[in-house]
Amino acid sequence: MIDEDDDTQEIPVVAEEPPSGDGAADPAATGSTAVAPGPTGEGDPEDFEDPGEQPTSPTPAGGATTATPTADSPLQQRSEQPVAEPQAEESEEAEEPADDSGSSAGTDTAPSSTASRARRIIDKAKPVGSSSTRRAGRIARKAVGRIVSDSSASTQPIPIIAALKGTPYQAPVESTAKSEDEARMILDLAVDIGAIMLRAGAGSADVEVSVIATCTSLGLLDAEVDLTSNSLTVHYANPDGSFMTVLRVNREESLHFAKLASVHALVSDMAEGRTDYLEARERIDAIRRQRRPYTEALVTLARGILAGCFVLLLGGGYVAALLGFLMAVVNDRFGALLGRTGIPVFFTVAGQSMFTTLVAMAAWTFDLIAGPQFLVASGIVLLLPTVGLLSAVQDSLTRFPLTAASRTVEVLVTMAGIVSGIALGLRIGLLVGLSPIEIVVEPTGMAALSVVISLLAASAVSAAGAVGHQASRRIVVPAALVGLAGFGTMMAMSIAGFGNIITSLVSATVVGFLCRPIALRRSAPAIVMLLPAIFPLLQGLSIFSAVYEIIQPQEQVPLSAGLSSLFAAIIANAALAVGAIFGDVLARPLRSPRRSQPPVDPAPAV
């Protein structure tokens, strides 16, 4: 019980308003205020959500003021009403009645700023006792925090359509919300599109924007997409509060760039309102059954041409190019045979690189070729994880860290298989009496080539790469021209004396800059043209040279020198991927979105 004549009074606190008829004493009637005990016997600060201005009772003779909670006080209504907005609190205080005694000293008008309100509340908190002081301080600090803080959420969810900015689908025609059955069918369509793209070799960013564009153009504006390197999940919340989640798992990858182009064209038509759900479902079912544009034999032949032309590009002779062609054909069939057994990729790649090294050593021993390193380099180019490297860099730059980490591990395992196979092949060759390989020219080798032969070889390498990745026929010639431009840039910078890494970066940037607008004009994603066009720039010879240094005796070449060369070769290949993505980003503003046509009704039939 607090004496009314004391010049300091405790803040009136009411934990809960007792129901009428319980016989609880009225604090206003007795002239005292009871503090509701918390779990430890003290007032629980969580019970005081918003200690605002209260009407006061007449001032006693001692000058003390006893605040009396009213029926509509915020303290009495803390369990029934949420904390009011700051503006609402100020307007309520402005309407509070004056003192019953009519004294101007007991009347306090509402301040115009939150700082004044905070100062007034702290000035009122002058309780007696150390524990009460700490409790009142906590209450005051919490009240001040609620007054000065913004009632709105600190972060708001980003609309899913914002993820389409800078993509070919950045302005999709949005439809209306769908029923639960319609939403389920649209989700199935979107996930089918994403799963086909994952299997065909698309990057994570391309898969995500395609799924988002499908959902938004068909009316699911609140869908969420989550994907890894081998799975895709799409989640949707209906306006009535029900949830739906669809999952697809991709257990193996089979490169099919023609199928990627077909999916891209379908999503573009949906985003521009030219295709409804029924037509989209028919088209995606047809795309799933789409045959490859080239037979397996033609693909093997294209890889042989790629290896032979790469030998010419590096400076090898025609005999070496012919051997490279034959070696690539046999190696491709050998790898396919190992793949059917279910053996891990590491051992398959190691076996293929070992076979390549032994063929080069045998040709060198019998004086069939003058530069065995070119033959090994051409075989390495076919084994490099170009798709995985490009996807890993793209995922890391487009905020897919988990997928980027997964793809990076796959790239490193494949690179380890290549290095192990080369080292094993060199050792086995020496054991059977083959002559050791000697590096007879510099790794670039471009000074020994005529301009005409090198440029023609680069174009043929890019065209063969497009065929080898099952790109459609309308992509082959543009890929060859872009590859020619990229290799010409690399040759010019090398002659000018630029370093290998900066040369790779700039050349790949040129390729990426050209690929995006050309590919989009042919209704295909950029990767369909980007990957074949980057083949002439790959650093296969640098990798072989580094491995050759590693296996040399320590007294001739230190191990640190070989490891440094290998690291530089890997960085140069990574620079190719970074430059290609950078060029793609630079080319985004060049293509303005086409004006969308009036949308058709995308509602699926139920």
Image (tube, rainbow, N blue to C red):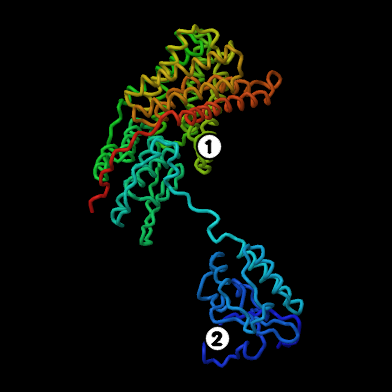
Vertical position of residue 132 compared to residue 189: above or below: below
Residue 36: tell me if it is visible.
no
Query: Separation of disc 2 and disc 1 at Cα?
Result: 61 Å
411 left or right of 211?
Answer: right
User: In the rendering, at what x and y percent does residue 89 appear?
Assistant: 56, 69
383 left or right of 556?
Answer: left
What residue sits right under mark 2 in the picture? 18
- What SS does tag 1 mark? helix
Quarter residue 430 falls in: top right
What label does residue 397 carry, if any? 1
Vertical position of residue 348 compared to residue 381: above or below: below
Q: Residue furthest left?
A: 605
Looking at the rendered image, the quarter that the N terminus falls into is bottom right
Q: Of the two numbered discs 2 and 1 on the same chain, state the one appearing first in sequence.
A: 2
288 left or right of 526?
Answer: left
User: In the rendering, at what x and y percent does residue 56 appear?
Assistant: 64, 80
Quarter residue 253 falls in: top left
72 left or right of 116?
Answer: left
Give whichever of 429, 578 is nearer the camera: 578
Looking at the rendered image, the quarter that the C terminus falls into is bottom left
Q: Amino acid at mark 1?
A: Leu
Give whichever of 188, 130 is nearer the camera: 130
